[in-house]
Image: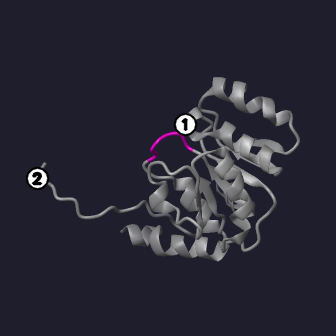
Amino acid sequence: PDLIYDATIHHGIDLSPFTFQDRPGEYLLFLGRIHPDKGTHLAVEVARRAGLPLVIAGIVQDRDYFRELVEPHLTTAGVTYVGPVGPAERDALLGGALALLHLIGFAEPFGLSVVESLATGTPVIAYPLGSMPEIIRPGRTGFLVDDVDGAIEAVGRVGSLSRRHCRDDVEERFTAARMV
């Protein structure tokens, strides 16, 4: 109780494993644990309704959720599950994506995959929960949306964002040196 709050120190990353990509591919990406809290099924819906392919990468943490709400869509053209990925594949997937979909359902303390995405130049579309309003600069490094319809609308606007601004923001605020 006697401690005085001074500042928030955000998690910092080593930028060397993340390659800046000025030109995006034509797919959306979900990267993270396959769990209801992470909103994988919402990413599937956004991609389907936006008419874009979706790549899903990550460990299946909730098998029932995966089996019921994600796996049935893998037979749909354009929805691909690649499983857990190592550093090189993560870098390629993040850098090649049009946007990272981070439609979480809880107040996540920090979104490491969000900062990693921005480090490659890929903007993020997220719900404004937890640390997302601190990490994402709306209209500059991504969009904060309230629902699936808002996410679909944001997908249509993501091309107006500068991927260079995404990388620059990470270099300014989220490096390991900055954290120290």
Quickly name the residue at label 1: 37
The amino acid at mark 2 is: Asp
Residue density around tag 1, few if under 14, some if 14–19, many if 20 or more, within 10 Å: few
Task: Reply yes or no: does residue 125 show up in magenta.
Answer: no
**Residue type of the residue flagged with mark 1:** Asp
Extent of the magenta region: 104-108
Residue 56, x across and y down, in percent: 72, 44
- Camera-side residue of 47 and 111: 47
Indicate whether 56 appears above or below 113: above
Mark before the other along the chain sequence, 2 or 1: 2
Of 82 and 162, nearer the camera is 162
* Apparent side of residue 178 relative to residue 150 in the rendered image (left or right): left
Q: Is residue 32 above or below residue 36?
A: below
Q: What secondary structure is found at the residue carrying circle 2?
A: loop
What is the distance, in whole Å, between disc 2 and disc 1 at their CAs? Answer: 34 Å
Residue at the (81%, 60%) spot, across then down: 26
Determine if residue 60 is in view. Answer: yes
Question: Residue 38: horizontal and vertical position, in percent?
Answer: 58, 40
Q: Is residue 142 above or below residue 52?
A: below
Place of residue 166 in the rendered image (x, y in percent of width and height, measured from the top left): 59, 70
Q: Where in the figure is residue 171, as x and y percent of width and height?
A: 51, 74
Mark 1 residue element: helix
Q: Looking at the rendering, which quadrant does residue 44 occupy?
A: top right
Total residue callouts: 2
Q: Quadrant of residue 23?
A: bottom right
Residue drawn at 68 percent across, 58 percent down: 154
Q: What main secondary structure does the magenta stretch of the protein show?
A: loop
The residue to which callout 2 is attached is 2
